[in-house]
Amino acid sequence: MLGLLAVLVLSPAARAQAPSPSRAMALEGQGDLPSAEQEWRLWLQNNPKDAGAFASLGVVLSKEQKYREAAAAYRKAIEIDPKLPGIHLNLGLAEFKRGDFHAAIDPLRAAVAESPKNQQARTLLGLSYYGAGRFEEASKHLKLASTADPSNPQLHNVLAQSCLTAKKFDCALQEFSWILKQNSDSASAHMFLGQALDGLKRTQEAIAEFELAAKADPHAPNVYFGLGFLYWKLGQYDDAARALESELSQDPDNPQALAYLGDVELKRNNPEKALPLLTKAIQQRQDIRIAYLDLGTIHTDQERYQDALVALRQAEKLDPDRIDVHYRLGRLYQAMGKPEESRKEFAKVHALQKKAEEDVASKMSGANPSPPRE
């Protein structure tokens, strides 16, 4: 009899210690996150189909900055109940916070589909596309987010860079112009605006922006390289040389500045000055096509045919569809007494010229354009 009474007396106390959602939420409210996490885990041992409990565990884990574990808990909740309110946004946010932008995209797309007016989901999706290097998609979502929050400078900045990288130059021009209205002394904004203007074939205006950038911050990385490159594009080689030399005075190992200054010297008929610049450029970086192209030209003129062939083949590897490299290979094979190889290279030149003409013709065709999409 006493044994039965003891059980009846002890049972309520034992039951009070059993894990429960209310106890887990109370512990979370008190800031005792480790205990709340443990409570949810104990509850889920006996309730493995409780989607809400997995979601709540994910929230606690996120607060503890255990984002990988939080994402796993959210995914389990989705597996049980994919229509659980807010679960896709929480999963996307956890993946975003742990820096896995690729993994964040799908749940955030689902969150936006569920609630198109949710600006947090829209912004996170745009930023995830940006972090994943998918700039076209990033620009679309960030544009919508920026329209909803027009005074947010961070959104304008990421949107502007997304548009620039996606070659949506009108969009980039608009955004960097907005940024400069907020801070006219921003060297980086002047440089980005210059890149957008150059993309729109407004190279003289781009030069003016790079001049303003150099004035705002003469030590900004690549400001004089950008200026020199723009002068180079216009064939203003003396101005290009001065700007590129200014860049190298601050950064003597800048491979792009070395390569383009080398090209300028070659165009000014100074191969003896060009050669060490070009050689140093490819020692710094092995992906600068113009440096290999020019080295091939110099070595050909010096009758160092094997060195020329190695350099030109590398230039071809970096961009096989450029006419200039096949033309120079054709000349090289002529000098080497290999007429058949030379003929093949000049045939490639002819084919690429024809392709370029066809591409222009297709752009000028009278076909009706597709209507714009919202």
Image (tube, rainbow, N blue to C red):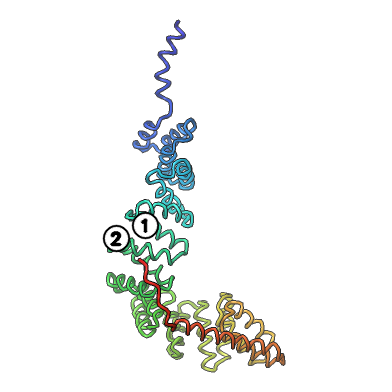
Picture residue at 59% right of the left edge, 82% below the top: 292
184 vs 365, nearest the viewer: 365
Number of marks = 2
264 vs 158, nearest the viewer: 158
The x, y position of residue 9, in whole percent, is 40, 13
Picture residue at 68% right of the left edge, 92% below the top: 334
Q: Quadrant location of residue 20? A: top left
Q: Which amino acid lies under the numbered mark 1 shown in the image of this protein?
A: Arg
Instruction: Give the mark nearer the N terminus: 1 vs 2.
Output: 1
Element at badge 2? helix
Q: Which residue is mark 2?
A: 148
Q: Which amino acid lies under the numbered mark 2 shown in the image of this protein?
A: Ala
The x, y position of residue 240, in whole percent, is 45, 87
- Report crowding for label 2: few under 14, some 14 to 19, many 20 or more residues within 10 A (C-alpha): few
Q: Quadrant location of residue 167? A: bottom left
Q: Which residue is mark 1?
A: 122
Image: 2 above or below 93: above
Image: 155 above or below 117: below
Element at badge 1? helix
Q: Quadrant of the C terminus?
A: bottom left
139 vs 245, nearest the viewer: 139
Q: Residue furthest top?
A: 1
Q: Are marks 1 and 2 in contact (CB under 8 Å)?
A: yes
Cα distance, mark 1 to mark 2? 10 Å
Picture residue at 71% right of the left edge, 89% below the top: 340
The x, y position of residue 44, in whole percent, is 47, 34
Image: 227 above or below 150: below
**Disc marking residue 192:** none
